[in-house]
């Protein structure tokens, strides 16, 4: 097979209606790690990331914040850039769909599709989810709600331009058949193939009821559908067809996305490209979904919006990257828990890698004066050194195999075979005994060289995942960053000086762990959920509130699923509420007016975006509305059967 020379990898471009969190950080760290791996192998890599700044969702968020869309997106996009910098993301370009060179490429794509006869004008009626920026049919809704967000959808009837998606069904299926690795993992591929076989309907590709987008060529009253605009970033970031970076890097080797947006990348995008006469990406990889301490990451739940920057400030980017990459095999869902993070830091990083580096450098300082001794491969023939060499060569081969197959967690597992193995062999090699016998000096030199080499190999192998810590280890060995292991026991030249620095990954003891977890836990991140430019709610001088101020209250119908008395609190009940596919617990001062059993099954009006606060040690995540001041006279009620989650306006 021809050796790959250029590699193009992409992350999704993120919506700027919310700030970065563990989920968006995850995708970006995964793609960065893969890109760094390919660079270490000497390939010409382009790593693309950025922000998706047009569309109704962003326009509405800007309106709610009371600022112009461009001002709004400038603030949030800066936050993404800063966060990616903190996470050591090495993108070749960060694209914004408001960048001046993006729109011409989108317009060019549109014109190519139009020239192919695939765009026509018609009328659409359907259910629209602003969260997804996507239409759904009756059959796709779940209990009348968006199947992804479980929130109410809007009925839209609009004249719009359409793309003849239906014409591409057979060609797309043929592409899937001829390219078994087009969508991975296989389970997801099968889901998409059955979706396509279920029939593709033409797609509405313009909107006319809002304006924040790229205008349809020749029709100022429509903006191009935000997904067409966004997907085009993968070619506009390269300058579009004909531009040198495009010619070098397109088609993409892999679009890495979350499973939520696989359909857009593996159905719509390839059909747009076929229509435009452009090559298709080689692979679309859908990874799984993170929950945070068991809960879905959601804007209305500050507790789930763990800020990656806060974690990086305390444990460093490398440890967070390692945890995200290692904890869950790419493709599966995972849960982000602080104690699991600390557990991995203490075991894999402090005990295994940190310890190996520390004891090897200590050995070099103590027995050979901190100078890299010569290896004597003749001494390798028997025993531990030969075995360690075999382990290292195997770890490298496995790491390569897994990185090439987009499986970073497996690559790290393979690398840890070397790290853990090397720690085991230190005892077996017994350098302290050799040091006592001057006649065995060559053997001692060989042992020390071999362990330094194991440290060097470990550092180069972990570098794609942990670039800063790898650079620190390499600097301790007197080397610069970069490179990939080449020849066992020959990568480190004798004669150089090594230095033992501060411990790489200090252990986190129980007291420190408690302190960190308290610091990272929600309330502090609550401010994050609010767009930065949001004006405070202040009553106008005459005591009235404006409609926009009122609209910031997220009032919804909630159904009481469970109720119980709060121990040692006469007035309080703890309620579990269904607020439309999401569960909340609240503590309400209604115990003197209602028995718990009367409440189950009732529907009440609920304020969902009240800042959570602990009441008697229980986190109350919102508030139900009731009449009465000190004693509750009546709970809010609805006089018709309205589903939980319905907005109250
Ligand atoms: O969909 N777990 O942007 P977005 C894992 N603008 N990954 C998660 C996650 C979670 N809980 N939450 C988010 C968009 N992600 C569009 C994309 S691309 C042409 C346009 C990650 O801000 C995951 O990669 O909603 C998911 O696909 C992406 O963020 C969605 O980001």
Image (cartoon, rainbow, N blue to C red):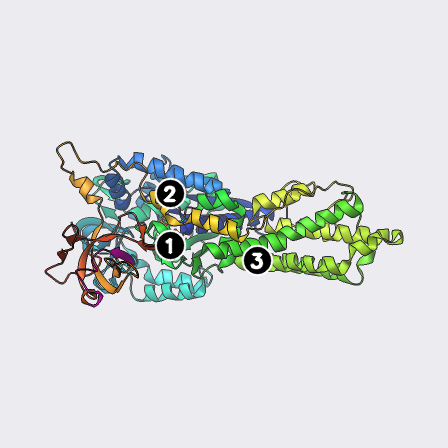
| Cβ–Cβ under 8 Å for marks 3 and 1 | no
* Residue 500 % position (x, y): 69, 43
Query: Visible in this render: residue 239?
Result: no
Place residue 99 in its image quadrant.
top left
- Indicate if the residue with disc 1 has its beta carbon within 8 Å of ligand 1: yes
The magenta stretch is: 583-597
* Residue 235 vertical position relative to residue 581 in the rendered view, above or below: above
| Mark 3–mark 2 distance (CA, rounded to whole Å) | 29 Å
Q: Earlier in the sequence, mark 3 or mark 2?
A: 2
- Please name the residue that numbered disc 2 is placed on: 51
241 or 98, which is in the foreground?
98
- Please name the residue that numbered disc 3 is placed on: 411
- Indicate if the residue with disc 2 has its beta carbon within 8 Å of ligand 1: yes
* Residue 193 % position (x, y): 37, 65
| Most distant residue in the left direction | 639
Query: Visible in this render: residue 574?
Result: yes
Callout 2 crowding tier (Cα within 10 Å): few <14, some 14–19, many ≥20: many
Q: Is residue 219 left or right of residue 496?
A: left
638 or 408, which is in the foreground?
638
Secondary structure beneath label 3:
helix
The image quadrant where one finds the N terminus is: bottom right
Q: Is residue 3 left or right of residue 574?
A: right
The dot on residue 265 is 1
587 drawn magenta: yes
* Residue 554 % position (x, y): 22, 49
Q: Earlier in the sequence, mark 3 or mark 1?
A: 1
């Amino acid at each position: 097979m021809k050796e790959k020379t250029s590699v193009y990898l992409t992350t999704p471009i993120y919506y700027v209606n919310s700030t970065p969190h563990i989920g968006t950080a995850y995708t970006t760290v995964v793609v960065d790690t893969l890109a760094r791996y390919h660079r270490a192998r000497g390939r010409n890599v382009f790593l693309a990331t950025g922000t998706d700044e047009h569309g109704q969702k962003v326009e509405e968020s800007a309106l709610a914040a009371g600022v112009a869309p461009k001002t709004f997106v400038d603030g949030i996009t800066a936050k993404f850039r800063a966060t990616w910098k903190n996470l050591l993301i090495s993108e070749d370009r960060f694209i914004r769909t408001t960048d001046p060179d993006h729109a011409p490429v989108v317009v060019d794509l549109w014109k190519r599709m139009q020239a192919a006869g695939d765009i026509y004008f018609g009328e659409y009626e359907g259910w629209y989810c602003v969260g997804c920026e996507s239409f759904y049919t009756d059959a796709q809704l779940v209990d009348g709600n968006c199947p992804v967000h479980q929130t109410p959808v809007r009925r839209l009837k609009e004249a719009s331009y359409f793309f003849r998606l239906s014409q591409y069904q057979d060609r797309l299926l043929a592409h899937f058949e001829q390219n078994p690795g087009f969508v991975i993992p296989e389970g997801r591929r099968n889901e998409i193939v059955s979706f396509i076989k279920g029939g593709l309907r033409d797609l509405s590709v313009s909107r006319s009821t809002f304006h924040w987008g790229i205008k349809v060529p020749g029709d100022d009253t429509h903006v191009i559908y935000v997904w067409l605009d966004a997907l085009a970033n993968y070619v506009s970031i390269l300058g579009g067809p004909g531009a040198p970076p495009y010619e070098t890097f397109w088609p993409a080797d892999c679009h890495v996305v979350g499973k939520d947006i696989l359909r857009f990348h593996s159905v719509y995008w390839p059909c747009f490209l076929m229509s435009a006469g452009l090559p298709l990406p080689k692979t679309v990889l859908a990874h799984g979904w993170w929950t945070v301490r068991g809960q879905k990451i959601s804007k209305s739940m500050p507790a789930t919006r763990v800020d990656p920057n806060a974690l990086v400030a305390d444990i460093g980017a490398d440890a967070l990257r390692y945890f995200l990459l290692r904890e869950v095999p790419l493709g599966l869902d995972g849960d982000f828990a602080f104690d699991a993070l600390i557990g991995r830091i203490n075991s894999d990083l402090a005990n295994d890698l940190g310890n190996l580096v520390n004891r090897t450098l200590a050995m070099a300082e103590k027995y050979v004066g901190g100078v890299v001794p010569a290896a004597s491969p003749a001494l390798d023939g028997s025993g531990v050194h030969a075995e360690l060499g075999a382990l290292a060569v195997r770890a490298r081969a496995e790491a390569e195999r897994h990185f090439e197959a987009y499986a970073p967690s497996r690559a790290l597992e393979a690398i840890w075979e070397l790290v853990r193995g090397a720690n085991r062999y230190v005892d077996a090699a017994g350098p302290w005994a050799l040091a006592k016998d001057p006649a065995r000096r060559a053997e001692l030199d060989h042992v020390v060289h071999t362990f330094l080499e194991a440290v060097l190999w470990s550092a180069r192998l972990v570098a794609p995942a942990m670039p800063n810590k790898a650079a620190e280890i390499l600097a301790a060995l007197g080397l610069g960053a970069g490179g990939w292991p080449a020849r066992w026991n020959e990568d480190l030249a004798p004669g150089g000086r090594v230095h033992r620095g501060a411990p790489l990954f200090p252990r986190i003891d129980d007291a420190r762990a408690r302190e960190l977890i308290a610091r990272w836990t929600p309330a502090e991140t609550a401010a994050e959920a609010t767009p930065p430019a949001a004006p405070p709610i202040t009553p106008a001088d005459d005591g009235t509130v404006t409609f926009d101020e009122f609209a910031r209250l997220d009032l919804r119908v909630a159904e009481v699923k469970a109720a119980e008395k709060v121990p040692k609190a006469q007035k309080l009940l703890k309620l579990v509420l269904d607020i439309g596919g999401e569960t909340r617990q609240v503590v309400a001062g209604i115990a003197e007016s209602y028995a718990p059993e009367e409440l189950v099954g009732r529907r009440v009006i609920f304020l969902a975006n009240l800042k959570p606060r602990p009441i008697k040690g229980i986190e109350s995540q919102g508030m139900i509305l009731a009449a009465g001041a000190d004693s509750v006279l009546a709970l809010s009620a609805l006089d018709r059967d309205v589903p939980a989650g319905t907005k109250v306006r």
